[in-house]
Image (cartoon, grey):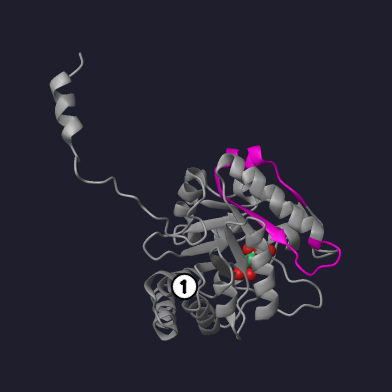
Amino acid sequence: MADNEGNIDAKKIGIGTPQKQDGFFLKGNEHACYGIKARLSQVFNEKSGRTVMLAFDHGFIMGPTSGLERIDLTINPLIQYSDCIMCTRGILRSVVPPTCNKPLSLRFDAGSTILTSLNDETLGDIEDAIRVNAALLAVMVAIGDPDHEGLTIANLTKTVDMGMRYGIPTLGVTAVGKGLNRDARYLGLATRVCAENGANVVKTYYCDEDFENVTNACPVPIVVAGGKKLPERDALALAYNAVTQGACGVDMGRNIFQSDSPVGMLLAVREVVHNNATVDQAFDCYETYKAENK
Ligand code: R5P
């Protein structure tokens, strides 16, 4: 039976208090739809505004690269310490436990491998991305590659269109074109082109000079890849320099899973990204974990 008196009281609640209008914490996504913001909020921590994405999608172009031969043994134990996982649908379905409960940055493109010409890519199926509950659609954009620049930019725009239809944000992944340096001028151009074509987030590389110009001129959040394995302190310095110069976190793979203490590295990177730890503090975190977990 309807509770008329209760309803009358309820109508009075909040009179004189304007409904709170929240802004959105990630730059460039204020005007995105609810689904896109909700999924970005799964990937990025609202408090720090940053993310630690664990990337293990390398096999789609490299095969079983070092550290990824047995993802069940090397990567699954790390997932709990990440904010988001980045992988292909094949590895997701065959190896990653559906109970892992982490947002998924799904590798949404597929194509040529390191054995031929990289970046000759096609796209996945948006229905399958929905089926596996993707929180981000990751697509490579090969700016400066004379053979694949147009194709990969078209792939990005198609992905953005498909994603917007279902409220799934797109991660533009900048590849490095042949003969082009990873300097601020190139990275600034590549990241901006991704954003201009609708990417909600852009993944790129850190550069030692003027990286702040890259993050500043990109209207959406940038996350940095780690690249080839570095000594642990150098990889932590890379993460530190990137976030203190405006990156909203990392999308890191080899510098974590090829480390002699992958959990220690992941925890140390988290300290940098979410707790503004210095390089010394983060390195200490890595060494302590490693020493205590031999
Ligand atoms: C490369 O195939 C992928 O895009 C990786 O996800 C990306 O490069 C990040 O991994 P890493 O930190 O190993 O560079």
Percent position of residue 26, x then y: 46, 60
Q: Is residue 122 above or below residue 82?
A: above
Percent position of residue 199, x then y: 62, 57
**Picture quadrant of ligand 1:** bottom right
Residue 193, quarter of the rendered image: bottom right
- Is residue 275 in view from this perspective? yes
Q: Is residue 130 magenta?
A: yes
Residue 150, quarter of the rendered image: bottom right
Circle 1 packing at 10 Å, graded few (<14), some (14-19), many (20+), is: many
Which one is in front, 108 or 101?
Answer: 108
User: Mark 1: which secondary structure?
Assistant: helix
Q: Residue at x 65, y 80 (%)?
A: 184
Residue range highlighted in magenta? 122-149
Asked whether, in this view, residue 148 is left or right of residue 289, the answer is right
Q: Is residue 121 above or below residue 286?
A: above
Q: Residue at x 69, y 71 (%)?
A: 189
Which one is in front, 133 or 218?
Answer: 218
Name the outermost residue toward the front: 16
- Is residue 69 in view from this perspective? no
Q: Residue at x 76, y 57 (%)?
A: 152
Percent position of residue 265, x then y: 48, 73
Percent position of residue 151, x then y: 80, 56
Name the outermost residue toward the top: 1
Q: Is residue 3 magenta?
A: no
Q: Residue at x 71, y 45 (%)?
A: 124
> Which of the image's four quarters has the N terminus?
top left
Which one is in front, 269 or 213?
Answer: 213
Residue type, numbered disc 1: Val
Q: Residue tagged by mark 1?
A: 269
